[in-house]
Amino acid sequence: MASQTRAKPEGALRRISSVDDLLNRPAIRALGPLAGHALLVEAVRDVLHSVRERVAREAGGFTTEEIERDVLERVEAELAPSLVAVINATGVILHTNLGRAPLAREAVERVAEVAARYSNLEYDLERGERGKRDDHTDRLLAKLVGSEAALVVNNNAAAVFLALNTLAEGGEVIVSRGELIEIGGSFRIPDICAKSGAVLREVGTTNRTRLADYAAAINERTRLLLHVHPSNFRIVGFTERPALEELVDLGRRHNLPVMEDLGSGCLVDLEPFGLSDEPPAGRSLAMGVHVVTFSGDKLLGGPQAGIVAGAREPLQRIRKNPLFRALRVDKMTIAAIEATARLYRRGEMDSIPALAMIRASAESIAARATRLKHRLDEVPGFTARLEAGESVAGGGSSPGQALPTTLVVVEHQERSAQELAAVLRRNRPPVIVRVERNRVTLDLRTVLDSHEEDEIVQALKRNSEEMA
């Protein structure tokens, strides 16, 4: 019982437990197999150092039990992973801060299988000799988008950079001023172009660029005509830019390749589901675009990757660029892309979570929201109601366009919306919500399944019990 008495600052330094005494306390010793001796010693020493400093400042006393608790909390914090799964109740489907597209179950299983064992990553099983890792995705992706060849690198910025460096280094790239975009993370087309070794030749104005502007800029140093899909903004009003077919025809007449950065990586027509300005990559290639680049973890619904698809000749040149090796992807990314692509080939779009969320009807989400609202009505201290709202694609896709949804608006009789949102973030698993007009709103379009709905209810119940 003596250890439970709070030691006073006077003479307290002599009564602080030693490292060995604390390591031999049952609760700390029990962590040994999980944490390891070195981590336990480090945690004990750090906590004791803090206690000694506090006592020396006469900033308060201590008990051995308090020291032990601090050690246990420190060890738990050290062992806890930093990257954790969260429940996305924001209604932002491709939430960049939350990891963009969640993988399909088939892709997760393929990643786990390939990651845990040896694989034929760069081994040709037919010939019994060294192979190429991009063979696993080349033909499959090419068939999906209707190209002659396809390559995979680590993200779309890398895809754009590698293509420009290969096709236009030392020469000029013509692009409209209205397409000099910047997306999240300060990815700017002019910066990528400059780093690639190509010279950017801007034509037209911010809101109006005509085919004649491109034609007038072509000279002996021109290597490429670049078309950039405006991933995260819209210019409205008096606008003009040439149709992609016109740009392809201009390139053909001057023997210049046309490259398009599509960004979001749409493979199927999403207009029937409310996203009308995301052209599928295959459509651009069918128009005669030589090289198209796009992301793997946005509307495609796969892992982070940059995909380069197009005609065989420029793709072969890009494949031979020494930088390709520096930007290539690993076996787990290849496994996830291959599994996701096969779902497309089989027409199983709703097995890809991001596409299932986009394709989900407003009626189905309203039904889920109604069920959740009734469950939350039974949690003491909370009120819940339904409200019409909008979900968005996110990830720089389809700006200005939204999908109709039903929001569950949650309020607590004592906590503010910001406090409630913080409580939900601290839950395990964390629940990420939107706060609008001092209200917490839940959009079930991005809540994956009934299990995650259960987690939301339990998180609010725990909060209610803590407040009681």
Image: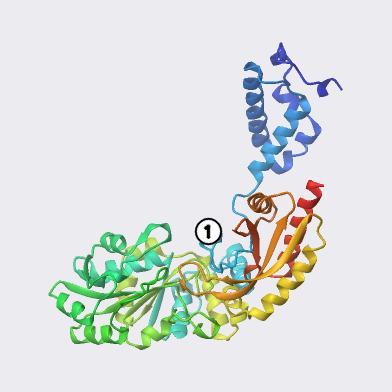
Q: Quadrant of residue 157?
A: bottom left
Q: Which residue is mark 1?
A: 97
Name the residue: 72% across, 66% down.
385
Q: Position of residue 147 (x, y in %)?
A: 39, 84
Check the image and report above or below for 353 versus 423.
below
- Inspect this view and state whether residue 345 appears: yes
Name the residue: 41% across, 67% down.
156
| 198 to the left or right of 396 | left
Q: Residues within 10 Å of mark 1 (few under 14, many from 20)?
A: few
Name the residue: 64% across, 27% down.
45
- Is 158 in front, or is 437? 437
> Which structural element holds mark 1?
helix
Q: Quadrant of residue 449?
A: bottom right
- Is 404 in front, or is 197? 404
Q: Position of residue 293 (x, y in %)?
A: 38, 73
User: If the image is split into quadrants, where does the N terminus sit?
Assistant: top right
